[in-house]
Image: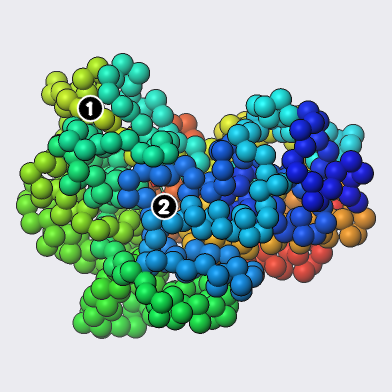
């Protein structure tokens, strides 16, 4: 039922207390589509967004060189052919400014802005059992009473900070990549230090190396690096990918990682020569294909992992040439693809420039940050004008755990996840009726997926679920404890058989002190996951309590 005092077409109210059918937290890729779907269903719905505009990840991550590692044409919404085809990418892997423009295009085209309240951070969300509604508090003083609450808070939205003592004493600029100011900062001719060499660090380093006077990169865990091929798109390229719209729509939701390509051949079925030939072909594609369409066995079999890892190491050694750089920058401690694989454009070659220096933190760790720069434990001081923190995020759980979320009986999500990170299919959590999650742990969208594919699937499932609750005359839905136990057990069984579980990274939460360790992403495949979600819906939500 629509509430009397709101309308699905209304602008976000200026009242201090707003009553809604549904509130969406976040206006990124997931939040925008969720808002649109629920509005189309006729619900009174609004979204709140901490930023001053839409975009989520693509609003915040405006650091130099930020760009897709997914092909642009698979990083789009597929529910509306015209919406898809009326946007044209200028290259295979577009950069942040173009991505942000695309998100603005989607927002305006779907007329979503009027339903979004920007500059608003949710501070608390408490479930009131008497009314079966969520009471949501924000930092602007506006509160919401809503039947359904959907978290689209992003997988990588809480930057890590305060990692080293003395950060506040630094006399130059110190900033996290995901808090890069609009308009940028001028690094020309400056002495810059970058801490962190994940997908973000790689993009920053390769971009600023030619601009700065001096670049010092603090390398702790090196990455397997695959060179990106990023051709510009002319009209015929654009037409060619748009012609594949129907094919993409049927393919993307049926692959292991939501990309257009998938694992096709078994390692054991090929001769050593054929394996090498296949690896060379995939490497030459200049995309994530060698990882996500190579050999699935790299995720579970140590011998295959070692052979493929050695193939990539060989390519990296050829590019780096210098033995000291090879020692610092070629990974040996973990297997290819058990952490997120970055694509690069001259990242490795940047280290061969005279103005770029790699500091191997495995030999000498950072002691602290002080007024003039970064002091090492051996006493060396790296004098700097700018420190770039490319140190990553409190992923998947971070944003929601920073909100005081209370479910039935006053239970706290922060405390629950502080003990053990559990969800039901990454979509709901036992004890928290009518709270829906996207990008949350125990679903592929937590890491192992082309995000728009998985976020479209999850938000569509949530919309269908909400429709079911309303049309069957119920007021709330919540997974049973046994359902959650079964999903967690299923998730763990698959996850713990992979080499991902044995490898430290944000994928297992090891980058955040005290975070309970669990493989965050469902590793059974986005395709399998989608089918399991569909089965739940088709069963009439068996294993869920509808009241
Ligand atoms: P990541 O992938 O978490 O990388 C963070 C990097 O920062 C990584 O190299 C870390 O080394 C390093 N790091 C973190 N803390 C420290 C400290 N205290 N000292 C030195 N180095 C540190 O984050 P990104 O932003 O690059 O990428 C996140 C995702 O965005 C990526 O996976 C894609 O999905 C898109 P460590 O590995 O911990 O030794």
Of residues 79 and 508, the one drawn nearer to the viewer in this rendering: 79
Rendered image coloring scheme: rainbow
What separation in Å lies between label 2 and label 1 (alpha carbons)? 25 Å
Which residue lies under the disc numbered 2?
Answer: 96
Helix, strand or loop at label 2? It is helix
Of residues 291 and 270, the one drawn nearer to the viewer in this rendering: 291
Q: Does label 2 point to a residue whose CB lies under 8 Å from ligand 1?
A: no
Coordinates of residue 512 in the picture (x, y in percent):
44, 35
Of residues 392 and 238, the one drawn nearer to the viewer in this rendering: 238
Residue depicted at x 80% and y 59%: 41
Coordinates of residue 104 in the picture (x, y in percent):
55, 53
Coordinates of residue 390 in the picture (x, y in percent):
34, 39
Q: Quadrant for ligand 1?
A: top left
Residue depicted at x 77% and y 37%: 13
Of residues 340 and 260, the one drawn nearer to the viewer in this rendering: 260
- Crowding at label 2, few (<14), some or many (≥20) Cα neighbours within 10 Å? many
Report the disc number at residue 385: 1
- Crowding at label 1, few (<14), some or many (≥20) Cα neighbours within 10 Å? some
Quarter-wise, where is residue 319 in the image?
bottom left
Helix, strand or loop at label 1? It is loop
């Amino acid at each position: 039922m629509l509430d009397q005092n709101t309308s699905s077409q209304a602008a976000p109210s200026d009242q201090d207390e707003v009553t809604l059918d549904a509130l969406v937290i976040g206006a990124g890729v997931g939040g925008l589509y969720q808002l649109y779907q629920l509005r189309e269903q006729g619900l009174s719905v609004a979204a709140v967004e901490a930023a001053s505009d839409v975009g989520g990840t693509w609003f915040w991550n405006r650091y130099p060189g930020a760009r897709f590692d997914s092909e642009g044409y698979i990083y789009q919404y597929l529910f509306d052919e015209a919406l898809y085809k009326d946007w044209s990418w200028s290259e295979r892997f577009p950069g942040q400014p173009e991505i942000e423009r695309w998100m603005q295009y989607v927002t305006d085209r779907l007329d979503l802005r009027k339903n979004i309240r920007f500059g608003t951070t949710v501070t608390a969300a408490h479930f009131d059992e008497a009314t079966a509604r969520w009471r949501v508090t924000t930092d602007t003083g506006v509160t919401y009473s809503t039947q359904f609450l959907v978290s689209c808070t992003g997988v990588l939205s809480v930057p890590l900070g305060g990692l080293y003592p003395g950060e506040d004493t630094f006399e130059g600029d110190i900033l996290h990549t995901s808090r890069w100011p609009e308009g940028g900062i001028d690094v020309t001719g400056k002495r810059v230090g970058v801490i962190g060499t994940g997908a973000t660090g790689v993009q920053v380093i390769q971009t600023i190396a030619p601009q700065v006077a001096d670049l010092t990169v603090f390398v702790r865990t090196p990455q397997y690096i695959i060179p990106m091929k990023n051709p510009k798109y002319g009209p015929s390229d654009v037409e060619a990918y748009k012609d594949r719209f129907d094919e993409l729509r049927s393919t993307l939701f049926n692959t292991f990682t939501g990309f257009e390509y998938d694992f096709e051949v078994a390692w054991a079925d090929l001769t050593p020569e054929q394996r090498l030939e296949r690896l060379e072909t995939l490497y030459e594609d200049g995309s994530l294909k060698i990882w996500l369409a190579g050999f699935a066995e790299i995720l579970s079999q140590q011998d295959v992992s070692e052979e493929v890892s050695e193939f990539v190491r060989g390519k990296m050694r050829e590019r780096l040439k210098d033995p000291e750089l090879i020692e610092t920058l070629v990974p040996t401690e973990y297997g290819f693809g058990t952490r997120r694989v970055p694509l690069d454009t001259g990242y490795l070659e940047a280290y061969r420039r005279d103005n770029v220096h790699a500091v191997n933190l495995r030999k000498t760790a950072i002691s602290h940050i002080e007024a003039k720069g970064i002091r090492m434990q051996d006493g060396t001081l790296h004098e700097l004008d700018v420190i770039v923190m490319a140190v990553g995020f409190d992923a998947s759980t971070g944003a929601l755990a920073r909100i005081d979320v209370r479910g039935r009986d006053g239970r706290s999500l922060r405390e629950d996840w502080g003990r053990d990170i559990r969800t039901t299919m990454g979509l709901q959590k036992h004890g928290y009726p009518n709270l829906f999650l996207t990008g949350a742990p125990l679903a592929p969208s937590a890491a192992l997926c082309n995000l728009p594919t998985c976020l479209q699937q999850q938000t569509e499932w949530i919309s269908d679920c909400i429709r079911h609750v309303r049309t069957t005359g119920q007021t709330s839905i919540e997974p049973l404890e046994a359902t959650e136990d079964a999903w967690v057990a299923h998730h763990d069984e698959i996850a713990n058989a992979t080499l991902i579980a044995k490898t430290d990274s944000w994928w297992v939460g090891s980058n955040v002190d005290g975070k309970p360790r669990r493989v965050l992403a469902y590793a059974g495949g986005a395709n399998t996951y989608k089918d399991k979600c569909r089965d739940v819906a088709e069963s009439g939500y068996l294993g869920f309590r509808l009241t």
